[in-house]
Image (spheres, helix red, strand yellow):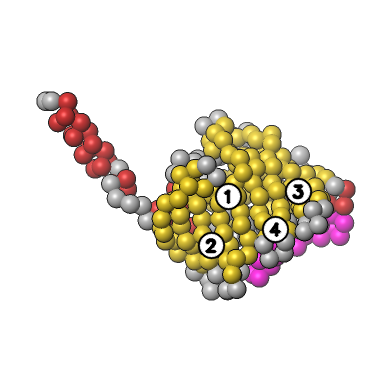
Amino acid sequence: MSKLAAGVCVFLSFLICFPAFAAELTGREVMVLEDERPDGDDRTSMITMTLINKRDRKRVRQVKSFSKDYGKDKKSVMIFREPADVRKTAFLSWEYDDADREDDKWLYMPAMRKTRRISGASKNEYFMGTDFTYDDMGDRSVDEDVHTLVGEEPAMGHDCWKIESVPVDKEDMYARKVLWVSKTAHMIMQAEYYDKDGLLKVYKALEAEERNGFWTLLSSEMNNVSRQHRTLMETTEVCYDSGLDDSLFRVSTIQRGRLP
């Protein structure tokens, strides 16, 4: 067999084995790639949140973050370390892959010794003064939105698919989102959030790199156009697959303050 014929055979075999690459991906298929991006079975990191108002005044918060996969579901907990007025505040979330099942979220406030359940319209409230809502902080199920591939466009140094996502729930805070998903990292590199009146927020992934074979977000910014307020997120001390204990992700654990 000639080299040309052999090459054609290999190419045809590739298309048969990987039909998704033989045709243009749909918006949903792109978002499934993003949702299922490999990131280990569990993850630990330190996050520095810098909140910047329109007068350029800054407030800085240090947060320890843990998360663990349970099949296609995920449990996460974030504990505030600094400053003193929010120290030991903890946010626990159980996120379900089933779009018909509402995620469970709790916020423990040590000053009041009270745990508040975050549900319903509370999901649209801003998280601890940042420009991320409680819902933004979670791992949203792919089928909570209808995704349409609207083109291909570079963003933040990556070749990206451009996706328009419209929530299935008409009561959702956002009327639509426009997302730029990296073709190599399968990570959202840029996003625009709109309500019925226009542009609300712009998200950018400022720095991302491969660590231990996993694409890792190291720095990001959410620019809240409507509030003239920004939140920078910088991630350090990233660790994958350390074997996190299930007890970390219980309501009773955050209430007792027994967190590492």
The residue tagged 4 is: 131
Q: Amino acid at mark 4?
A: Asp
The residue tagged 2 is: 177
Give the spatial CA distance, label 3 vs label 1: 26 Å
Kindly identify which numbered label has been placed on residue 253.
Answer: none
Mark 3 or mark 1, which has the lower sequence index? 3
Given the current orientation, which residue lies at the most extreme top position?
Answer: 2
As helix, strand or loop, the secondary structure at mark 1 comes to strand
Viewer-proximal residue, 31 or 243? Answer: 31
Q: Position of residue 62 (x, y in %)?
A: 78, 44
As helix, strand or loop, the secondary structure at mark 3 comes to strand
Residue 72 versus residue 13 in the image, above or below:
below
Q: Given contact means CB atoms under 8 Å apart, are the residues at marks 1 and 4 in contact?
A: no
Mark 3 or mark 4, which has the lower sequence index? 3
Residue 153 versus residue 237 in the image, above or below:
below
The residue tagged 3 is: 50
**Residue 28, magenta (yes or no):** no
As helix, strand or loop, the secondary structure at mark 2 comes to strand
Given the current orientation, which residue lies at the most extreme front position?
Answer: 55
Kindly identify which numbered label has been placed on residue 74.
Answer: 1
Q: Position of residue 100 (x, y in %)?
A: 51, 65
Please give the count of numbered marks on the rendered protein.
Answer: 4
As helix, strand or loop, the secondary structure at mark 4 comes to loop
